[in-house]
């Protein structure tokens, strides 16, 4: 019977074999049932280091003294819900770094070991936003299923108003990725009818899309505000999007040339962006 590490190694080799046969990330992902991000990471590592083996990690191994170990056991026995940060603080005098708190087998979900949390129903929201070098444009909350018709409605209600708000010149171009809703026949016809020029976009190029960075930052600041309902979550998204400084948008647009150079240097492979 193969061990877990050996199975993972064979899977990584299979990814490289299919990649060398000329297949793209999407095809490999579908063939092996792996996320595209995993496929991309495996190929990037192979291109950079020429191997699919696990690379040695930097830094010294974690060490803990018998004294610190006894203190850890006493703390957790006394209060099972003690967090790693609390343990870190209590052990500051012995300079121990705690990343995880391990429980005995089959005790993880015992009532005494669970820290209660409050959650709201619904979970998440989908939003659409646009921006230019001069600042953020409008943000739309998407209710229900997202399809070509909904996408066209969003464009109709938000793109040109954002162009006016940001005082863009007539030479502006709409950048969108290759999502099927963006490239469908009906959407293409709608864009042509409404005279919206789009930027030609290569597939699987999230690292070229400056909107990804804004969305990443938006998620962090909204999460930090700890919304207690879907309505609050939606409002916080709108509030924080509007707060994005124009300087941040300008930097992302200005970095676009560097992103292109990085992609060319990587010969179409993944980059650090």
Image (spheres, rainbow, N blue to C red):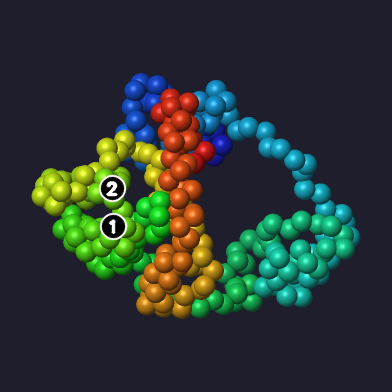
Nearer to me, 100 or 1 = 100
Relative to 260, is 163 on the left or the right? left
User: From the viewer's perspective, is residue 41 above or below residue 17?
Assistant: below
Tell me: residue 266, above or below residue 117: above
At x 81% / y 68%, what residue is drawn? 90
Residue at the spot of label 2: 172
The reply to whether callout 2 and callout 1 are in contact (CB within 8 Å) is: yes
Q: Residue at x 71, y 38 (%)?
A: 58
Residue 122 percent across, percent down from the top left: 36, 72
At horizontal 68% and vertical 37% (from top left) the residue drawn is: 57
Q: How many marks?
A: 2
Closer to us: 243 or 47: 243
Is label 2 in a helix, a strand or a loop? loop
Q: Earlier in the sequence, mark 2 or mark 1?
A: 1
Residue 183 in the image: above or below residue 135: above
Q: Position of residue 187 (x, y in %)?
A: 16, 50
Residue 163, numbered circle: 1
Residue 123: x and y in percent read 40, 69
Distance of label 2 from label 1 (alpha carbons): 8 Å
As drawn, the label of residue 182 is none
Question: Measuring 70% from the left and 71% from the top, which residue is drawn there?
Answer: 82
Expressed as whole percent of the image width and height from the top left, the position of residue 199 reads 27, 41
Q: Closer to the camera, 137 or 51?
A: 137
Whether residue 10 is visible, yes or no, is no
Q: Relative to residue 200, is residue 243 drawn left or right?
A: right
Most foreground residue, 3 or 188: 188
* Left or right, 223 with reference to 150: right
Q: Is residue 202 visible?
A: yes
SS assignment at label 1? helix
**Within-10-Å neighbours for mark 1: few <14, some 14–19, many 20+:** some
Decide: few, some or many residues near mark 2? Use Cα within 10 Å; few <14, some 14-19, many ≥20: few
């Amino acid at each position: 019977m193969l061990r877990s590490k050996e199975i993972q190694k064979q899977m990584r080799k299979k990814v490289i074999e299919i990649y060398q046969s000329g297949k793209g990330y999407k095809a490999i992902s579908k063939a092996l049932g792996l996320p595209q991000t995993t496929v991309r990471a495996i190929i990037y590592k192979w291109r950079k280091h020429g191997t699919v083996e696990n690379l040695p990690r930097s830094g010294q191994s974690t060490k803990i003294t018998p004294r610190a170990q006894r203190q850890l056991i006493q703390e957790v026995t006394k209060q099972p819900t003690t967090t790693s940060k609390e343990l870190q603080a209590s052990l500051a005098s012995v300079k121990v770094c705690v990343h995880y708190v391990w429980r005995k087998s089959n005790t993880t979900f015992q009532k005494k070991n669970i820290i209660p949390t409050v959650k709201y129903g619904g979970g998440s929201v989908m939003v659409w936003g646009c921006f230019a070098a001069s600042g953020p444009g409008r943000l739309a909350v998407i209710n229900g299923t997202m399809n070509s018709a909904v996408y066209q409605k969003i464009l109709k209600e938000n793109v040109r108003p954002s162009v006016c708000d940001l005082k863009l010149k007539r030479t502006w171009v709409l950048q969108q990725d290759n999502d099927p809703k963006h490239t469908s026949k009906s959407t293409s016809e709608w864009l042509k009818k409404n005279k919206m020029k789009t930027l030609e976009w290569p597939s699987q190029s999230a690292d070229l899309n400056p909107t990804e960075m804004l969305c990443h930052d938006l998620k962090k600041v909204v999460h930090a505000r700890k919304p207690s309902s879907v309505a609050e979550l939606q409002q916080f998204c709108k509030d924080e999007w509007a707060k994005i400084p124009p300087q941040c948008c300008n930097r992302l647009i200005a970095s676009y040339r560097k992103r292109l150079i990085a992609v060319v240097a990587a010969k179409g492979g993944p980059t650090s962006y």
